[in-house]
């Protein structure tokens, strides 16, 4: 269910249409509560990539400072934190889209620094092997996994959220290698390995959302 309230259903191929409809009907009260919650959730304004604009990194808010270089060499462009500001050094002719792309690559690099240690930590704790992980821009999920290939996909937007949220999503996806469904067994596994997972989930879902159609992990 993305933040616009649209309901999307994922079901096993062997499940009949009637069984799917009955499952959805059974969940209607919960769906209504989630739609109401999404309607109240804060949204970021459309990004213009100009001085003073607010951006997030690991849950902290930073003001953007755009520094125009004296060269058109793309290799000279960079993003860094300096004195509490997010400094974007770009070519004089850089478009809004190219600035956004540069910032996205910065977020990707930050995730790549954090994810390996977190995956290793929880793989050891749970004794669940993860063969690979990847970072993608996703509009409907914080994360997903391929059980057969032992692969985890993480939403690029997680770089903007507090680190405990990233840790929660990684553990969440790892546990799907052991239990595919969001059932009582899955929740019991989360309770065992991360007793505060609900507060981490709530923190993730309380953070401002990008002004775009992509959703939250609701479990």
Image (cartoon, rainbow, N blue to C red):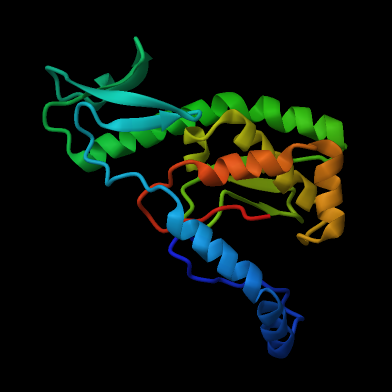
Looking at the picture, how far across and down is residue 192, in whole percent? Answer: 87, 40
Q: In the image, what residue occupies the spot 80% across and 37% down?
A: 195
Q: Tell me where residue 68 sits by quadrant.
A: top left
Q: Quadrant of residue 82?
A: top left
Extreme top residue here?
83
Q: Is residue 180 visible?
A: yes
Query: Seen in the image, is 3 located left or right of residue 180?
Result: left
Residue 173 to residue 59: above or below? below
Residue 1 visible? The answer is no
Residue extending farthest bottom: 18
Q: Quadrant of the N terminus?
A: bottom right
Vertical position of residue 119 compared to residue 14: above or below: above
Viewer-nearest residue: 58 or 201: 201
Look at the image and tell me in which quarter the C terminus lies. Answer: bottom right
| Image quadrant assignment for residue 83 | top left
User: Residue placed at 47% from the left, 34% from the top?
Assistant: 160
Place of residue 178 in the rendered image (x, y in percent of width and height, measured from the top left):
84, 52
The percent coordinates of residue 62 (x first, y second) are: 36, 24
Task: Answer left or right for 171 relative to 85.
Answer: right
Residue 218: percent from the left, percent from the top?
Answer: 63, 55
Query: Image check: 117 left or right of 156?
Result: right
């Amino acid at each position: 269910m993305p933040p616009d309230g649209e309901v999307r259903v994922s079901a096993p191929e062997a499940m009949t249409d009637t069984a799917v409809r009955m499952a959805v009907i059974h969940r209607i009260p919960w769906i209504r509560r989630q739609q109401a919650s999404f309607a109240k959730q804060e949204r970021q304004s459309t990004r213009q990539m100009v001085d003073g604009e607010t951006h997030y990194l690991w849950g902290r808010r930073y003001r953007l400072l755009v520094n125009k270089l004296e060269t058109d060499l793309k290799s000279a462009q960079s993003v860094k934190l300096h004195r509490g500001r997010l400094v974007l050094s770009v070519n004089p002719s850089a478009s809004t889209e190219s600035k956004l792309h540069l910032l996205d690559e910065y977020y990707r690099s930050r995730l790549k620094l954090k994810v390996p240690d977190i995956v290793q930590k929880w793989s050891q704790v749970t004794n669940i092997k993860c063969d690979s992980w990847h970072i993608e821009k996703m509009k409907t999920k914080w994360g997903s996994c391929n059980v057969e290939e032992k692969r985890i996909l993480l939403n690029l937007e997680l770089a903007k959220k507090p680190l405990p949220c990233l840790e929660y999503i990684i553990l969440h996806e790892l546990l799907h290698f052991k239990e595919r469904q969001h059932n009582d067994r899955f929740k019991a596994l989360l309770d065992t390995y991360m007793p505060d997972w609900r507060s981490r989930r709530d923190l993730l879902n309380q953070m401002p959302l990008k002004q775009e159609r992509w959703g939250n992990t609701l479990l």
